[in-house]
Image (cartoon, grey):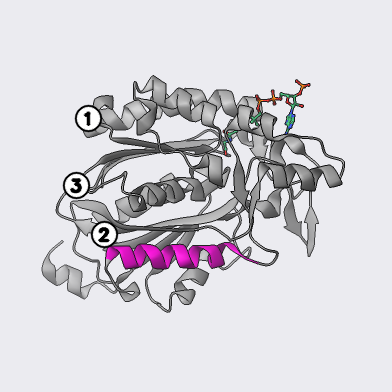
Amino acid sequence: MTQTDQHSSPQPAAQAARYSRIIGTGSFLPPKRLSNHDLVAQLAADGIETSDEWIVERTGIRARHFAETGVTASELALPAARAAIEAAGISASEIDLIIVATSTPDMVFPSTACLLQHKLGIAGGAAFDVQAVCSGFVYALTVADSMIRTGAARKALVVGAEVFSRLLDFKDRTTCVLFGDGAGAVVLSASDTPGILATELHADGRHAGILCVPGSLHGGQVTGDPLLKMDGQAVFKLAVGVLDKVARSVLEKAGRSDADIDWLIPHQANIRIMHGTCKKLKLPLDKLIVTVDQHGNTSAASIPLALDAAVRDGRIKPGDTVMLEGVGGGFTWGAVLLDL
Ligand code: UT7
């Protein structure tokens, strides 16, 4: 397209960049923190038996944060987004794309991204949600990277924000001890130097039933069960298989090897899956970023929360090569390899 064509099109596209790059990260956890002991006591009061030992041994989780009643995903997303924008050293008005990955949106519509855009005091850029459950952040980052490289956007805010506590059945000990609430965000900018090196996304809807919230709205009523259902063992088996394969595939696309990975940030659901993934990539465990112990499984928020924690505590430094891997309901999975 010529310069003249660009100017005469009704919505002038930004100049296409060769690459996109993360220039800032941020995160936010709701203040209410429940240790395993707190949760065990709360569940015991309702006759549900579990223990700190079981939760730690089977999952690695020691604590999680729960949003207070009425607090929404966009409210968690806002401080995470502000922190990422501040770290990027830009003004919110420069953001021309917002993608929020969430399975717990504020409303059926409009999107949480539109609500976040308004809360940030900006308007006019594109804003939409991505629903890929625990793979949501990897999906959203891939979409934002593609839009930046085609010139559809120059500065994208990519957020994972969840209030999964809303979906939990506190009478089901096999799921309610696993999840938490939170938000993480990155600012992705057009760049002449490579940041995101390779991405890959997958889904297999045949496995929709192994992790789902089957309810829906109909005529002003919730029909079906609006609480989370999971066949943990089926999810576990699928996750272990797909994560190694997709990681190897993005490494190959990027022309890198497992030895080039400085940090591995898989979806934070279960420390046993995370250790397995790390070992299959022949990485020492000290290259694995772990927040599942303190956050539980925060679905789409887990990867950006872990990324921000490791950037802020100085482990992940500019120039480091980071592998992000998502897996979850759908069944969905994917990976992003990037240089920070
Ligand atoms: O975010 C998307 C990705 N999600 C995941 O990656 C989750 C993947 N799955 C998992 O992490 C694991 O499968 C779980 C942590 C969910 C479960 O661990 P598991 O080792 O697969 O346990 P299990 O389901 O085989 O259950 C073992 C036993 C059962 O008792 P019996 O039948 O052996 O007597 C359960 O009833 O543990 C029992 N159990 C519990 N006991 C105490 C299940 N939940 C609990 C609990 N406290 N909270």
Secondary structure under the numbered disc 2 in the rendered image: strand
Question: CB of residue at label 1: within 8 Å of ligand 1?
Answer: no
Residue 189, image x, y percentages: 26, 59
Q: Earlier in the sequence, mark 3 or mark 1?
A: 3
Q: Earlier in the sequence, mark 3 or mark 2?
A: 2
Badges 1 and 2: C-beta atoms under 8 Å apart? no
**Marks 3/2: CA distance?**
11 Å
**Which of the 4 image quadrants contains residue 52?**
top right
Q: Which residues are magenta?
A: 71-88
Secondary structure under the numbered disc 3 in the rendered image: loop
Q: Determine the residue located farthest toward the front in the rendered image.
A: 37
Tell me the residue that label 1 is attached to: 256
In this picture, residue 107 sits left or right of residue 15: right
Q: Main secondary structure of the magenta part?
A: helix
Residue 108, image x, y percentages: 63, 63
| Mark 2 surroundings: few (<14), some (14-19) or many (≥20) residues within 10 A | many
Residue 187, image x, y percentages: 33, 60
> Does the segment drawn in magenta span residue 184?
no
Residue 30, which numbered label? none
**Marks 1/2: CA distance?**
23 Å
Residue 194, which numbered label? 3
Q: Amino acid at mark 3?
A: Pro
Q: Amino acid at mark 1?
A: Arg
Tell me the residue that label 2 is attached to: 189
Question: CB of residue at label 3: within 8 Å of ligand 1?
Answer: no
What residue appears at the point 63 percent right and 28 percent down from the top-left corner?
Answer: 58
Task: Pick whichever, 253 or 94, lies toward us.
Answer: 94
**Marks 3/1: CA distance?**
13 Å
User: Ligand 1 appears in which quadrant?
Assistant: top right
| Mark 1 surroundings: few (<14), some (14-19) or many (≥20) residues within 10 A | some
Residue 5, image x, y percentages: 17, 69
Secondary structure under the numbered disc 1 in the rendered image: loop
